Every structure is written in C-alpha cells, then in structure tokens.
Amino acid sequence: MFTDDTIIAPATPPGEGGIGIVRLSGPGAEDLLLRFFSPSRVSARLDSHYLYHGILRDSSGRPLDEVMAVLMRKPRSYTREDVAEIHCHGGNLVLRRILDLFLAAGARLARPGEFTLRAFVNGRIDLTQAEAVIDLIRSRSQLASDVAFTQLQGRLAVKIQEFRGRIADLLAEIEAAIDFPEEDIELDNAQVLGTNTGLLLADMDHIISTFDSGRILRDGLNILIFGRPNVGKSSLMNSLLGEARAIVTDIPGTTRDTIEEELILAGIPLRLVDTAGIRNTDDPVEKEGVRRARIKVDSADLILLVIDGSSGLTDDDLMALEFCRGRDVLVVLNKSDLGSLPIPEILEGLSLVRVSALDGIGLDVLIQAIKERFSGSGNATDIRETVVITDRRHRQALLLAREALSRFRKILTEGLSPEFGAVELHEALDAVGEITGETTPDDILDRIFTKFCIGK
C-alpha cells in the first residue's frame, strides 16, 4: 500500500448545494494548496487547523472561486498526513474545475475509502473503527448510528485487544514450557490455564451472541407479511407504513408480486415485504406470485402470518402455516373489529397478536411484539451500553478463535505436548487479529474499503 503520493477527492456528494468540499491528503497537500490559494490576509505561513478566507486561482492566476481553506498538518489529521480542505460553492461545475486544477498539478484522484485506508495504515484507527465509519454513514436509525459511533470511538477494538492480551498470556505460559522442557506444566498450572481459557471462551460467547441484534441494527429486520388471500396483509402493511402503499380490494389475488418498503419502527430499521396470497390456483401469474412468496420465507428474520381472526381456519391458512414451519413466526389475528373466534388448537404455543389493520386496533401491541423479537427484553438501551458486533466478518473471526481455544483446552485436559497447544493459540491470535487489522489479508482489506464512497 503506497501512501507517498497526494490524493484528492470531493468530500461532499455530487449535486448542487450551498457548500462543496474538496479534500487533499499526502506530502504535497500544503504545497498544492499554497500554489493556488490566495488568503485574504497575507501570511508567511498558514497556521494548522485554522480556516482561512481567500480566492482560489487557476494556473494562469484567474479567480476560480471565493473559498475557505484549512490546512491540517500531520499527525493531527484524519489520515495522519498533511490534509488540506477547500470549502467552495457547491455545484458540479465548480467542484470539477477545482478537481481538474489539482489533478493537473500532480495530485491523484483518490480511490473509494482511500482517506480512511490511509488513516488505518498510518495507525490512527484500527480496522473495526474504519468499518464503523461506513456503518455510521449508512446507518438508517438513531440506534444504529449510536452503535456505529461507539465502535468508531474504539469500544469494540478495546474488547478485541483484551481478548488478544488474554490469548497472548496463555501462549506465554505454553511457550515457556516449550523453551524449558525440563519444567513440564504442572497439573495445577494446567488447571489454571484451563480455567482461564474457559472464562475467555465465556466472554467470547457473550460478544458472539450480540451479532443477531447488531446485524439487524445495521442491515434492518426483514419482515415478511404472509398468509392466504383476503386476510388483510396489504391493509396491515399500509397501516404499519402509515400510507396506502399496497392496493387493497375484496378480490382474491390482488397482490401478485412482492411489495417491499423500508421504515423505522420503534427505532428499528425494517424492511416490510408484502406477498401474494398463498392458495392453490391455476392462474399462472398468481401461481408465480405464490412461488416468489415461498422463496421469501427463507430470507425472512420474522414472518407475520396473517389470519382472519373473525372466521375459521381454511385449507389455505393451513398451507401457509406449513410453509412457515421452522421459521420465526408471529401470528397476527386480523379483523378483530368483526369479532374474534377462539384460538384454534393448531395455533396454540405460537406467539399471537389480535389486531384490526383497518382501524389500527392492536397495532401498538404488534409493534411492541416486533421490538421484543429484536431486542429480547424490548430494551434497546442495553445495546447502546454494551459491545455489539454488527459485521459477519467479526463474528466469523471470533468463531474461528473460539474453536481454536476449545481445541487448546482439550489439549490441556488430555495432557498432550505443549507444542500442540501453542499451534492452537497462534491460530486464535491470528483470527482475533483479523478483526482489528493486525493479520487481515490484503484482499479482505480491499473488499472492505471499496465499500466506501470516494472522498472518505
């Protein structure tokens, strides 16, 4: 990874706006800025971290724009390199002319995420903090933003470094036994190592267990509205959205394809998917809708199985219920405004909520039930105050480390040679190091940083 050149990119999104920002980073940032920027107040040298008013001129000395400029000298900058920013009038033409000016003078257009990559390479942040940057930018709810910000502050990194330290302590004990074979690990020492390993595994299990909640925070809860025709699936979706998004009629099979909408419900980002009614049909279009609805079952985090609570179960209801077998299901007994029959025996043991999608009765109870599915206790405050993993990469690395530690504990129990234990501990260290970036392969780094926008 070469960081000896100077990169440039717009730090604001394309389009018209009050302000546009162009960012440079690298050893030539200050010289390039001073070549074209004329401060209103003549100064022998720009002070670092001060905003200066002035005129940006092209290579022939003609004014390009009235701007504000700031120079941030290393290491007190985002990238730990010299960084310069030009705050100009927002507009595609102005930004493009400024970019072309600096590119012609020797700067290079930054790749996606290259500013943050340089911050990582230069040791300002670790990989978990770099990933938190993109999570913070893309967060879809206040809670997701809060969790991303705590990771940006380094809370997850501190916990991972704690794991690394504890694994390293175990490894030091084992390598001492390898270096001094005449002093075998005594039984008491082996028991202490085994106990410490067990405590470490328990702490890892706790962090791993937060992944489901963390993933939902970042990616959203995928909720499938499922059931036979005319039970009120589309009405339920419209009520949750607060708008008439899906067409509602008394004609069976009105919804022929999936309808997807995103919303924030009780602080949780959701993707609602309304599906075609499940029933036996000869209509080829409706049959395709049923097939697509069944496919969506496998990818749903939660299925709202909608049933007409004012009438008895039909064969189509039973078929829809069968399609949901083995999945996380919340039964929504709709049309409570028309009366409520006793709960059928086949539904006993399932979570149920009675609602009337038409007039909104019971929607608050349904929303609370969805919220509890997400956070267990229904208290999302705990998620803000604890370490949460939101990335599958982090979870996979912790699982690999856990497996290696479990094998190490088994080696201790069986009294095998310390060399075998050292191999497992080295593997655990490597796995944990992938999370923070100490041992992350370059192809993984490339994959992470290409997710970023240009200019960050």
Image (cartoon, rainbow, N blue to C red):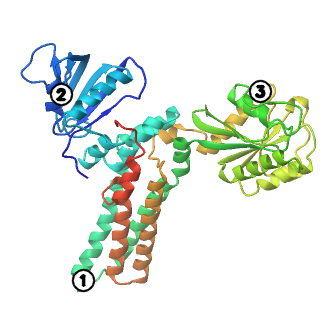
Q: Which residue is at a point 50% across and 42% down the rendered structure image?
A: 383
- The residue carrying mark 2 is 33
Q: Which residue is at a point 14% across and 26% down the rendered structure image?
A: 35
| Above/below status of 386 relative to 12 | below
| Above/below status of 432 relative to 55 | below
Q: Which residue is at a point 70% across and 31% down the rendered structure image?
A: 240
Dot 3: within a 10 Å radius of its alpha carbon, few (fewer than 14), some, or many (20 or more) residues? Answer: some
- The residue carrying mark 1 is 183
Q: Which residue, as the protein is rendered here, is positioned at the far left?
A: 44
- Distance Cα–Cα, label 3 vs label 1: 74 Å
Disc on res. 360: 3
| Coordinates of residue 364 in the picture (x, y in percent) | 71, 30
Q: What residue type is labelled 2?
A: Leu
Asked whether the beta carbons under mark 1 and mark 2 sit within 8 Å of each other, the answer is no
Q: Which residue is at a point 82% across and 35% down the rendered structure image?
A: 232
Dot 1: within a 10 Å radius of its alpha carbon, few (fewer than 14), some, or many (20 or more) residues? Answer: few
